[in-house]
Structures are given as C-alpha cells and as structure tokens.
Image (tube, rainbow, N blue to C red):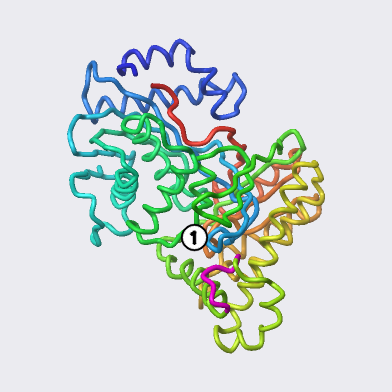
Amino acid sequence: MANLKQLSNQILSGALNERITAVYGCPQSAAPLYADRLLNLLEAFQVNFPTENDQVALFSAPGRTEIGGNHTDHQHGHVLAGSVNLDIISVARPNGTSIVRILSEGFPMDVIDISDLAISEAEKNTSASLIRGVIARIHQLGFSVGGFDAYTSSNVLKGSGLSSSAAFEVLVGTIVNTFFANQQLTAVEIAQIGQYAENVYYGKPCGLMDQMASSVGGIIAIDFGDPLAPVVEPVQFDFAASGLALCIIDSGADHEDLTDEYAAITREMGAVAAHFGRQYLRQVAEADFMAQMATIRVKTGDRAVLRAMHFFAEDRRVANQAEALRHKKIDQFKQLILESGRSSASYLQNIFATGATKEQSVQLVLALCEKYLAPIGGAWRVHGGGFAGTIQAFVPAADVMEFKQKMEAVLGARSCHVLAIRPIGGCCLVE
C-alpha cells in the first residue's frame, strides 16, 4: 500500500490510468474524469481521518443492472445481469483497533465495535447493520477481522434501481477481504456474504442477484439452483458496438417504505411452492403447477398464482436472452425485453404499490417509453424490484440523446442515465 501523498502523485502522473480503463471499460481519454473523482476522495479522507504516513488502499464496487430475470433469483431461478460504470469508491486503512468507522459522503459516520457482532434490532434497516453483518459473516468463515477507517463516495443513486445497498455490501466485503483475509474470498463468496448481511442483519429478504452482479462484474448469466454454489457464466456482448444504448430512467418515486411489497412477492411465490411441499418455485414443475391451478388459487389467492406464472415464463426467458446476446440477435433480444416488461406489469404486478391510485410514476415512465421507443425499435421494462424506482430502456444509439431530452422534459434533469457495462466487479483499485 501507499500513503495518501504517494497515491495522489500516482493518480496525478497518470500511473493509474491503465488500471482505471481496465476496471471501468472506458477509453483512455475518459480516465482523467475517474482520476479526478479519486483525488477528491483522497482529499476528503485526509480531512475526516487526518493522517500523514498511514498506508491506505483504494476500492470500488459497481452498481448493477438486471437485464433479465425480474424477481427470479429469490426463487432459485436464472438471472441475466451486468455491472455498470457507476460505483461506490472508497479509500480505507486498517486502524489497529476493534472499531470500524465508515463515513459515506453526505451521511453521518457509522461506528461499529466489532468485538460485538450480534444482530442488533435497533440497527435494522441501517447501513450499520450491513457493515456488522458483512463482518460477522466473514468472522464466521474463520477470518480474524480488525478495525478500519474508510471514506466512501457514491454515484450509484440511492433508489436508482442500480442497487446501492448491494454495492455497499460488496465494497465492505472487498475491503475486509483485502485487509484481513489475504483476498482468499472469491467474488461469489463476497456476494453471498453481502446477501447474508442484508437478509439477516438488515432485515430485507432479497435474493442474491444484486450482490452477484456487483461483485463478479461484466454481463453474467447466473443459475441459482444451488445458491450455495451458483453457476456463473460470462456473456460476451457489447451494447454500444451493436448500436444500442443502455438507459436507466429514474421515475422519481421513493421506495423506502416498500419492503412489505417486495416481501409479499417472495411470500406469495413461496406459498405456491409450499403447496407442493417445496420452498422455492424452482423446485416445482410448471406442468404440475398448471394441473393444480384450480386448487392453488383457492389456497393462495389469484395474485400468488399470477406471480408464479410470471416466474416460470421469466425463468425460461433468461436463457433465451443470454443466447440472443451471445449470437448477436438484437431484434430477438429486444422482443424478449418487451415480453419481460409485459409479464412484470400483468402477472408479477410490481408496477405500483397495492392500493396506489395517484402515485403511479413507474407506469407513467413505461407509457412514455412506449410512446417514444416503439416507433424507433427500442425496448423497455420495469427494472429491479419495481413499485417505484427505475425503468430500463434499450435505445438506438443514434436516438439516445433525443430520447434523454424528451424523458427529462417530463421527469426532470438527470433522470435519464446513459450507462455502460463495466467489465470488472468489486475490487481493490490500488493497494
């Protein structure tokens, strides 16, 4: 590792530009923009954790985009996902104590005494619970974890559907893996650790897709049939080279109070699986489900049945999407995106919250996408958990700036983000 001054000099000299372009998949000409952000990070660390010669390291964990598999991961299904070029970055150092201090730009400092790694009910739904949960799980795996100081800065917008919480979990896991585990933990294990923290310590019953995409990087097809040993396969595809721009449109709605809506999807799909004595829909044959639908709808309700129908179709769709990308069948891929969006709206029903009448921002954004993209051959769908948050759109590159302008005229400036797939997931940028 290097001290802050040495690291600043490396960045200023351009010595890190090759590493930056490799991680972010950006051209050399864009490296100075990323470098400036890293310099600002180092300055902020110096202000908040004054140091002269202490050795520090730089870390990054990207946000993710769900390309296929809307609410399939928590049923041990298939997912197609990718890491994006928005991330949480951090400068950190071991501090030789049992105290972890993480200051995230714009938020109060989290101070965790890791001599006590018990679940705290008072910490539920806080970043402190994620930190404690990640460290607790790594400790359970047999590693001796010490205290550290970290300053983080994120351009993964909170509530953006790009999963800032998973990126944060992966970031903390990567820091601990570097400082205290000799980088023995794999990207898959770090993702599993993040999910554990979110499920058990934070209290949100999420699947594993968000953490996996952030940790592994690139476009990946994931089979969660065995979540302890998920099968991860890279999918080589370049949207930009194929004439498509990837956009994420922020609807502006807040999803802070929607945990119950997300949990209801998991619960209702689980109720259908339980009819067959199973825990997850992946363990149920679709033919058996269809044959017993009359009985199941009485037992679980029609919405649960519709959500199960979405799962079976969406799970098959993921494999078809991956194959379409591998063979550069762009029109087929876009058709599958549209099918996924229709299924999420009609069957999964995660477009707006139960009983909502006035607040239907996601539905409005979908309507705008249809109006502007259908005539030019684009594709669009609800992105991530749904109910609030974001829409994903694949826009012909020649039309993307006009599309962005039209969407932001309704939704506000910086609501439409043009993104790129990042080839490398959570990592130590430089030690």
Q: Secondary structure under badge 1?
A: loop
**Residue that appears at 60% across and 67% down:** 283
Decide: is 179 above or below 414. Answer: above
Residue 153's image quarter?
A: top left
Decide: is 353 above or below 189. Answer: below
> Is 163 within the magenta?
no
Residue 287's image quarter?
A: bottom right
Answer whether residue 408 is visible to the viewer in this image: no
Check disc 1: other Cα within 10 Å, few if <14, some if 14-19, many if 20+.
some
Residue 2's image quarter?
A: top left
Q: Amino acid at mark 1?
A: Ala
Of 404 and 294, the residue lying toward us: 294
Q: Position of residue 145 (x, y in %)?
A: 27, 37
Q: Is residue 336 left or right of residue 44?
A: right
Of 252 and 119, the residue lying toward us: 119
Of 377 and 103, the residue lying toward us: 103
Magenta-colored segment: predominant secondary structure: loop
Q: Position of residue 319 (x, y in %)?
A: 71, 53
Q: Which residues are magenta?
A: 276-282
Name the image quarter holding the C terminus.
Answer: top left
Q: Position of residue 4 (x, y in %)?
A: 31, 18
Answer whether residue 21 is visible to the viewer in this image: yes
Q: Is residue 350 left or right of residue 401?
A: left
**Residue that appears at 76% across and 52% down:** 334
> Is 277 within the magenta?
yes
Q: Position of residue 371 (x, y in %)?
A: 74, 58
Decide: is 392 above or below 235. Answer: below
Task: Report which residue position mark 1 lands on.
Answer: 253
Name the image quarter holding the N terminus.
Answer: top left
